[in-house]
Image: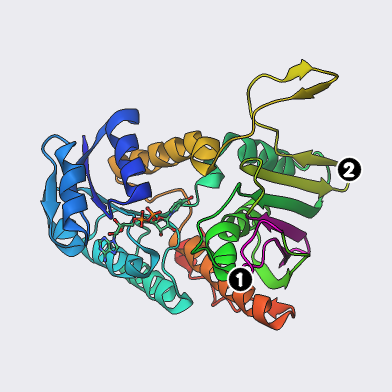
């Protein structure tokens, strides 16, 4: 049984706790911590034998914790990931790895100095069966070389505090990771376009945005992010290859034909759309923790690259120009 400690018992922290407690075998939540102590105690009350620690660092140091999940706010990720690396414990960190390129780079340095990979970042789309099916076709090269990808990220609505920057750092960041993973290539530049504004959006929000990502292998990826789609949560992706195209399939489930038309269900939000991907992601991470091997999912390098691409996206949003992505050299730890 793997004893997991969870730092940050907010929305996704509680969802991962539910997953670790009720969905997956061979793991239990042994400890929790949150700056909101009342919330941490409330969550622990539903977990038999779980301890509450006053700080994340104490949780990481505790001998009752084998592996760490970080689901606190983004700016606090760095301190906990560094503490877990120092303690030699596997750590699953929700995206972002850290909120600045410099902080991500410090995590890379710490992992490289430790000589082994112990960090996995929560880019769960890599575990989604529909994305995996598309990637298998692209990698199989039966359609020739990939040339372009069209992606869309449509949310039914967003909270009022959502900003144009969050469109890039919270929404498009998933498409950015998918592009790097789909084509096993880095993103070399980002340009951001602002189409006509959605009448459903607050005046302060650039909704929708269109990102153009240029990959190091010449593939071009366009990402539409539409935050007030109103009809549901709609994730699309189509890769255009030399000899054909391959696209994400629509939601599983029945297609209903009636009144001269046909239709199926659209997921209400990202939790419904990606629930199996989150389960698969944790199953994979726990298997490597149990085996004592390095994680096989998105690495600290993937977390670093996503943050640097987001920074270039934020610069492009302001400048209206094509902004280069200044990645540092990849340490050999991440190239094997
Ligand atoms: N992979 C995904 O699709 C996905 C989805 C949602 C959220 N996330 C990420 O998960 C993280 C948490 O998001 P959320 O929606 O659960 O937020 P949330 O606000 O619901 O929860 C965050 C929790 O962290 C706690 N916290 C803040 N600072 C802390 C600190 N220094 N130490 C310990 N706890 C602290 C807060 O009190 C809160 O309970 C974010 O980084 C977010 O980007 C990822």
Task: Return the mark for residue 282.
Answer: none
Position in image of residue 49 (x %, y %): 10, 38
Decide if residue 44 is on the left or right side of residue 78: left
CA separation in Å, label 1 and label 2: 43 Å
- In percent of width and height, residue 52 lies at 13, 51
- Residue 313, x across and y down, in percent: 63, 72
* In front of the other: 160 or 16: 160
Q: Is residue 146 left or right of residue 76?
A: right
Q: Dividing the image into four quarters, tell me where ligand 1 lies.
A: bottom left
Residue stretch rendered in magenta on the structure: 199-227
**Callout 1–callout 2 Cβ contact below 8 Å:** no
Residue 317 visible? The answer is: yes
Q: Between residue 85 and residue 8, name the one nearer to us.
A: 8
Q: Which residue is mark 2?
A: 243
Quarter holding residue 3: top left
Q: Secondary structure at mark 1?
A: loop
Colour scheme of the rendered structure: rainbow
- Name the residue at 70% across, 38% down: 248
Q: Which residue is mark 1?
A: 204
| Place of residue 143 in the rendered image (x, y in percent of width and height, measured from the top left) | 83, 41
Q: Is residue 85 above or below residue 143?
A: below
Asked if 247 appears above or below 176 in the picture, the reply is above
- Foreground mark, 1 or 2, reads 1
The answer to whether residue 32 is seen in the rendering is: no
| Residue 238 position (above or below residue 89) | above
């Amino acid at each position: 049984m793997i004893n997991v400690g969870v730092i940050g018992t907010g929305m996704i922290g509680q969802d991962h706790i539910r997953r670790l407690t009720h969905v997956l075998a061979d793991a239990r939540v042994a400890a929790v911590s949150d700056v909101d102590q009342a919330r941490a105690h409330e969550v622990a009350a539903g977990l038999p034998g779980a301890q509450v620690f006053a700080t994340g660092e104490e949780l990481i140091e505790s001998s009752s914790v084998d592996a760490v999940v970080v689901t606190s706010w983004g700016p606090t990720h760095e301190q906990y990931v560094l503490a877990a690396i120092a303690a030699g414990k596997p750590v699953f960190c929700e995206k972002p790895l850290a909120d600045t390129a410099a902080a991500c780079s410090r995590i890379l340095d710490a992992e490289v100095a430790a000589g082994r990979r112990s960090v996995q970042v929560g880019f769960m789309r890599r575990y989604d069966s529909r994305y995996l099916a598309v990637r298998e076709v692209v990698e199989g090269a039966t359609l020739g070389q990939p040339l372009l990808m069209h992606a869309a990220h449509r949310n039914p609505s967003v909270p009022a505090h959502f900003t144009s920057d969050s469109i890039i750092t919270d929404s498009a960041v998933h498409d950015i990771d998918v592009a790097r993973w789909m084509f096993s290539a880095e993103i070399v530049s980002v340009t951001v376009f602002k189409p006509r504004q959605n009448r459903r959006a607050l005046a302060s929000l650039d909704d929708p945005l269109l990102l153009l990502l240029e990959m190091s292998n010449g593939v071009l990826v366009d990402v539409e992010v539409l935050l007030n789609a109103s009809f549901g949560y709609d994730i699309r992706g189509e890769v255009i290859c030399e000899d054909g195209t391959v696209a994400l399939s629509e939601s599983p489930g029945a297609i209903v034909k009636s009144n001269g038309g046909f239709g199926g269900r659209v997921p209400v939000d990202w939790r419904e759309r990606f629930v199996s991907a989150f389960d698969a992601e944790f199953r994979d991470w726990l298997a490597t923790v149990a085996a004592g091997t390095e994680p096989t999912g998105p690495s600290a390098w993937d977390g670093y690259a996503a943050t640097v691409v987001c920074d270039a996206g934020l610069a492009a949003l302001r400048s209206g120009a094509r902004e280069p992505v200044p990645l540092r050299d990849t340490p050999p730890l991440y190239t094997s």
